[in-house]
Amino acid sequence: MHVNVFFMYQPKYHNDLLFGYEALLRSDNNGGLVCPHLIVDKNSDDNKFDYFIINSVIDSLSKISDKEVIDKVISINVSARFMSTIIILSNINIKTISELNLHIEFEILEGDKIINFNICNENINLLKMIGISVSVDDFGSDYSSIRRLINLKNVNFIKLDRILVRDIENHPELIKSIQILFEFIWSMNFNIIAEGVEKEATLTLLKSIGIEYFQGFYFSKPLRLENEVYPLEFADVEVWKDDFLESNL
């Protein structure tokens, strides 16, 4: 199956100051969304999709004329499988990263699927040497999430799963327990960023328990910053609909 994809960029904030963007994959095929998890799961083990995404985002950034954007940290989603196998730097467009002085961060999707923490940590150190930082996406409150943190080194941000953010908002009786979890994360010198912040009340509550980094529709919808499209040709690509996301594009 062939689809054309493009990237939208959702701003991320430190308190009320813009500090970065997350590159979000979208499809121009009838307004559908491409699901990265399904593509990764259904295709080969050579990480071709991850390298495609990384280099396409780098190319996308080269098309953005607003220096205020490309001077910020740009987060690119990568799979747990990608981080669990030795990264081949020659497959990444490091030249353009250097020429544009880009500040790139890899966000590990589905981090609970990391199968080799030793290789993952080696990759984190390797990426750090060329100026790419690493963060963990979709952090929840289950045991596997906590165990993952203990095994990972030199991670920049831990992004709270939006379900956990909703739990904090809807179940104030859980706040004390969740705050203990946050104190543990901070004790490991990780920053915490909350995604899915949609209301001022949620923002105020998160700030009251010490969260300083945020992402969500309260601040901004994802933005189309350039018009480039990229042909995605893999053995098994799934385009799916999400009414909530589509109504907020």
Image (cartoon, rainbow, N blue to C red):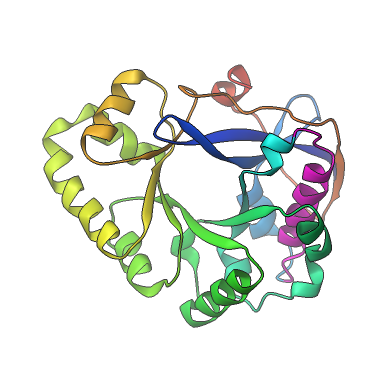
The quarter of the rendered structure image containing the C terminus is: top right
Which residue sits at x=25%, y=41%?
210
Part of the protein shown in magenta: 46-66
Which residue is painted at 48% across and 30% down in the image? 216
- Is residue 143 at least partly visible in the picture? yes
Say if 17 sits above or below 120 in the image.
Answer: above
Q: Which image quadrant for residue 126?
A: bottom right
Q: Is residue 27 above or below residue 158?
A: above
The question of residue 165 being in magenta is answered with: no
Residue 214 in the image: x percent, y percent?
A: 42, 36
Residue 239 showing in the rendered view: no
Residue 119, picture quadrant: bottom right
| Residue 237: image location, x then y, percent | 76, 47
Residue at image x 86%, y 43%?
230
Tally of marks: 0
Residue 160 as seen in the image, left or right of residue 122: left
Q: Is residue 66 above or below residue 143?
A: above
* Nearer the observer, 142 or 9: 9
Point 49% across, 57% down: residue: 135
Q: Position of residue 3 (x, y in %)?
A: 84, 40
Examine the structure image and report whether residue 54 is included in the region drawn in magenta: yes
